[in-house]
Image (cartoon, rainbow, N blue to C red):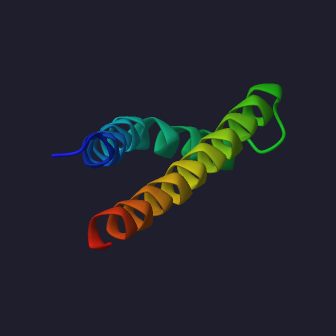
Amino acid sequence: MDLLLWVTIGFISIGFVVLISMKKGMENKLAFITENGESEESSKDAKSMVRWIYGVTLWGVISMALVVWSFHHYSG
């Protein structure tokens, strides 16, 4: 097997593990934000959640690009 395939599988697998492990913490932060609307700590948690969403979105886009690149590499 080629290195590209291993990188793709590893990147997606590690991303899923990190996503699942951080999911519960983000749910707790969301609950805290909804309970304490305008507090200072709530603002920090909201910024942390926005960064998490950006990171998950970036991981998804890179994963899709790696899958497309792998299909292109192995089909041609």
**Residue 40 place in picture, x, y as percent:** 83, 27
Instruction: Look at 25% across and 42% down and name the residue there.
Output: 6
**Residue 38 place in picture, x, y as percent:** 84, 40
**Residue 35, can we see it?**
no
Is residue 65 found left or right of 3 in the rendered image?
A: right
Is residue 9 found left or right of 62 in the rendered image?
A: left
Which corner quadrant holds the C terminus? bottom left
Question: Image quadrant of residue 23?
Answer: top left
Nearest the eye: 68 or 45: 68
Instruction: Look at 52% across and 53% down and name the residue there.
Output: 62
Question: Image quadrant of residue 22?
Answer: top left
Is residue 14 found left or right of 50 in the rendered image?
A: left
Nearest the eye: 1 or 20: 1
**Residue 59 place in picture, x, y as percent:** 51, 48
Instruction: Look at 33% across and 46% down and name the residue there.
Output: 4
Q: Residue furthest front?
A: 76
User: Is 44 placed above or below 73 here?
Assistant: above
Q: Residue furthest left?
A: 1
Q: Residue furthest bottom?
A: 75
Count of labels in the image: 0
Is residue 42 found left or right of 28 in the rendered image?
A: right
User: Is 36 placed above or below 62 here?
Assistant: above
**Residue 27 place in picture, x, y as percent:** 48, 46
Question: Image quadrant of residue 49?
Answer: top right
User: Is 42 placed above or below 76 here?
Assistant: above
